[in-house]
Amino acid sequence: MRNKVTIVGSGNVGATAAHWMASKELADVVLIDIIEGVPQGKALDLLEAMPIEKKDSHVIGTQDYADTANSDIVVITAGVPRKPGMSRDDLLNINHKIMKDVVEKVVHHSPNCILIIVSNPLDAMAQAAYKLSGFSRNRVIGMAGVLDSARFRTFIAQELKVSVENVTAFVLGGHGDTMVPLPRYSTVAGIPITELMDESTLGRLVQRTRDGGAEIVKYLKTGSAYYAPSAAVTEMAEAILKDKKKILPCAAYLEGEYGLQGLFVGVPCKLGARGIEQIVEIKLTPEEKTALDKSAGAVKELVSVIGV
């Protein structure tokens, strides 16, 4: 039985995630979108690349959720970006409405799937999907920490002129301005980066990580990041489909871990065949805990707007 992954939304993030997954032969991929022709065209183009890549992944595009039936993983990227003049609450309410429609259809056709949420605002949309799906908390995961820590790793490797393979980095908290990069737990070949650079350099890299998405938007002007976000989704999907038991920072629904209750917040998670198989609790300094609580507070504000 082949693995099957559905990606809801065939924009840049969704289509590029389909590309990564098909080229790694992780699964057969279904791209679904409300815009007629776009998922079909992108899927066919990608399918025609498979002979060149020497991969037997099947890729289809559709508007019909029946084609997504019995997916192992459903990645939700659907949603609208914030437009000029649109308040944060407007964006939240529009994307919550989209999430409601999507989750209802996904659950109907793939009741045993694992959901990976990419839609923004990430933590609030993951919370909405969790409540709407009725799934257990291990089966609803937000993609944020893998992306944020990849950005942090990139900047550390550039700063120290070392291979990115040597760099591990930790980022906790909500996906946004209040995220909590943890230099104390970030290393180069096992050496804490606090031993390799001074405090002001660390502070600069932490801030650049927080601003990572905005920096790309500033360059692109009419779009946002998609290569790294879609690669992050693919790493999570691979850990689940191959039952790797890989520890990755993900947005997870906390029930007392880190002293937080009833909220999606970015924490280290062990991903395997059942989705989130363990939430790893690490010791935080009082300053780190304060920063994490502040980040959780920002998520709480968002979820209160949509009442989830």
Image (cartoon, grey):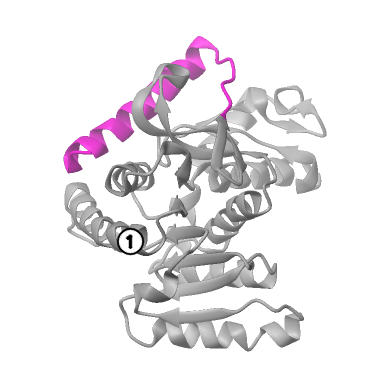
Residue interval drawn in magenta: 279-308
User: According to the image, label 1 marks what residue?
Assistant: 108
Q: Is residue 112 left or right of residue 274?
A: left
Residue 87 painted magenta = no
In the image, is residue 89 above or below residue 11?
A: above
**Residue 130's quadrant in the figure?**
top left
Q: Is residue 50 left or right of residue 162?
A: left
The residue sitting at 32% across, 80% down in the picture is 35
Name the image quarter holding the C terminus. top left
Amino acid type of the residue tagged 1 in the rendering: His
**Residue 177 x %, y %:** 40, 38
Q: Main secondary structure of the magenta part?
A: helix
Residue 167 x/y as whole percent: 74, 39
Residue 253 sits above or below residue 291 on the image: below
Tell me, yes or no, if residue 103 can be seen here. Answer: yes
Residue at image location 52% in from the left, 59% down from the top: 72
Mark 1 Cα shell of 10 Å, populated few (<14), some (14-19), many (≥20): some
Q: Position of residue 190 (x, y in %)?
A: 80, 29
For residue 116, above or below residue 250: below
Against 67, residue 231 (above or below) is: above
Q: Disc 1 on helix, strand or loop?
A: helix
Q: Give the quarter of the image for residue 291.
A: top left
